Image (cartoon, grey):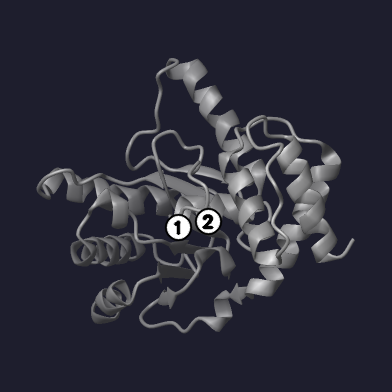
Amino acid sequence: MTQAERLDFLVEQFKADSIDYKDLQTPGDVVGKRRLLRSLMNIRSPRHIDDLILRVQDEYLKGVADEHGIVEVNDIPIRSECLSIWQGDITRLSVDAIVNAANSQMLGCFIPMHTCIDNCIHTYAGVQLREECNRQMNQLRAKFGADYQQPTGIPMLTDGYNLPAKKVIHVVGPIVQFSLTHELEQDLANCYINTLNMCMENSLKTVAFCCISTGVFHFPNERAAEIAVSTVRSWLSEHPGVMDRVIFNVFKDEDRGYYERLI
């Protein structure tokens, strides 16, 4: 199959898989087809999928990754110690682990075409990622009760599937509803500490952090960057030689400016 044929196949298969959208008209252009496929993937609940569909999806997403351009660790300059800043799409990074700013349900973003990092990571990893998250959450609910939700700052490790990254570390950051408090700042610091501890426990030597809790979680961007850098530096000083590279991945120019001032 060509990439165009894979796209056509997947659009029709994911439409047929959806009760509400099986009769939706398929756009005639590639951009429209890609948007429709992503949307259908975004809304799909975690469940079994046919092996052929999965195989074609994997081939298609590998092609998309190559098209977007895979960024290797050695392509990113070191600014200080083993710390780097990289501005762009975190799903392009070929590292041991990327960090996903997840919600407490841990199943990804179900809003079609949403621009949040959770949506992007689940889209380009493929539907297997949501299935694995669901399996892990079901195991936790069996242990802690049907109402279990992932606590703030407690990371979950999954495979990266079709991402260039080997693994994804999902972590729920603190939500700032009113004023910023010391407790919320400590919760954010714990996201970085616990994620780095998970890297150490699983021999993951390179990790890319997103800007946890900024955006829709309303943590002030500058303070979030200060906490991220100081916490990571403190952890690295206590665990020398454990990590080869820690990358702060930013998307906005504003955040890049904060990190460049701090590192």
- Disc assigned to residue 225: none
What amino acid type is highlighted by mark number 1? Thr
Q: Nearer the viewer, residue 123 or 79?
A: 123
Image coordinates of residue 126 in percent, x first then y, are 66, 49
Q: Is the C terminus in the top left, top right, bottom left or bottom right quadrant? A: bottom left
Residue at figure coordinates x 81%, y 57% from the top left: 6
Residue position for label 2 = 120
Left or right for 21, reference 179? right
What amino acid type is highlighted by mark number 2? Cys
- Disc assigned to residue 115: 1
Residue at figure coordinates x 75%, y 36% from the top left: 16
Left or right for 89, reference 79? right
In the rendered image of this protein, does residue 134 appear above or below residue 250? above
Image coordinates of residue 157 in percent, x first then y, are 53, 44
In the rendered image of this protein, does residue 262 appear above or below residue 209? below
Give SS at disc 2: helix
User: Neighbour class for label 2 at 10 Å: few (<14), some, many (≥20)?
Assistant: many
Q: Do labels 2 and 1 touch, CB within 8 Å?
A: yes
Res 237 quadrant in image: bottom left
User: Neighbour class for label 1 at 10 Å: few (<14), some, many (≥20)?
Assistant: few
Q: Nearer the viewer, residue 99 or 218?
A: 218
In the rendered image of this protein, does residue 29 appear above or below residue 17? below
Residue at figure coordinates x 55%, y 23% from the top left: 139
Image coordinates of residue 5 in percent, x first then y, are 84, 60
